[in-house]
């Protein structure tokens, strides 16, 4: 693995903490340290990822292991998002019900008050 790749990755992650960790790991890798050992120093990387990378380094199949990690993380994100959506849907329905109910009350309240105004009991003269 070339260190230039890690430099490019560090510039594209969009997270300052992760960017610093990747740059520091790149310098450790330049000194001859393994990829998984260099990334394991930083708690921002989950231990599952570093362990799978270590297994990939030992077997010579780091690309396969990284693909498995990517698939696992994609599935985990999908599961988290679907859970959040299932929580947001009822809240959104209640919010819309309150807003629409308030609009209906605001529309019909003057109509109900119209009978009192016509009979002379309401405010006015």
Image: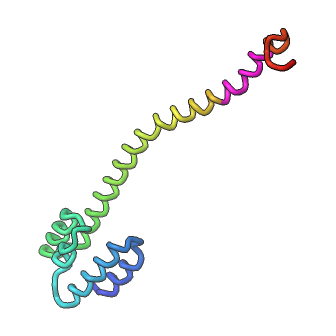
Span colored in magenta = 103-114
Residue shown at 32% from the left, 79% from the top: 20
Q: How is the image coloured?
A: rainbow
Residue 8, placed above or below residue 63: below
Compared across the picture, whether 103 is left or right of 46 comes to right
Q: Quadrant of residue 54?
A: bottom left
Q: Could you say where residue 75 lies in the image, as x and y percent from the top left? A: 32, 53
Query: Observer-nearest residue: 108 or 49?
Result: 108
Residue shown at 69% from the left, 27% from the top: 106
Image quadrant for the C terminus? Answer: top right
Compared across the picture, whether 96 is left or right of 10 comes to right
Residue 76, placed above or below residue 62: above
**How many tags in the picture?**
0
Residue shown at 22% from the left, 64% from the top: 46
- Residue at the farthest left position: 58
Query: Observer-nearest residue: 25 or 112?
Result: 112
- Residue at the farthest top position: 119
């Amino acid at each position: 693995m070339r260190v230039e790749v890690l430099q490019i990755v560090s510039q594209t992650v969009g997270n300052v903490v992760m960017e610093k960790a990747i740059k520091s790991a790149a310098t450790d890798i330049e000194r001859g340290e393994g990829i998984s050992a260099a990334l394991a120093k930083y708690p921002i990387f989950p231990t599952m990822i570093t362990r799978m990378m270590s297994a990939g380094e030992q077997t010579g199949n780091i690309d396969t292991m990284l693909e498995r990690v990517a698939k696992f993380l994609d599935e985990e994100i999908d599961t988290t998002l679907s859970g959040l959506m299932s929580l947001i849907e009822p809240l959104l329905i209640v919010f819309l019900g309150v807003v629409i109910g308030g609009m209906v009350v605001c529309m019909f309240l003057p109509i109900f008050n119209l009978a009192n105004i016509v009979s002379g009991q309401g405010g006015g003269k």
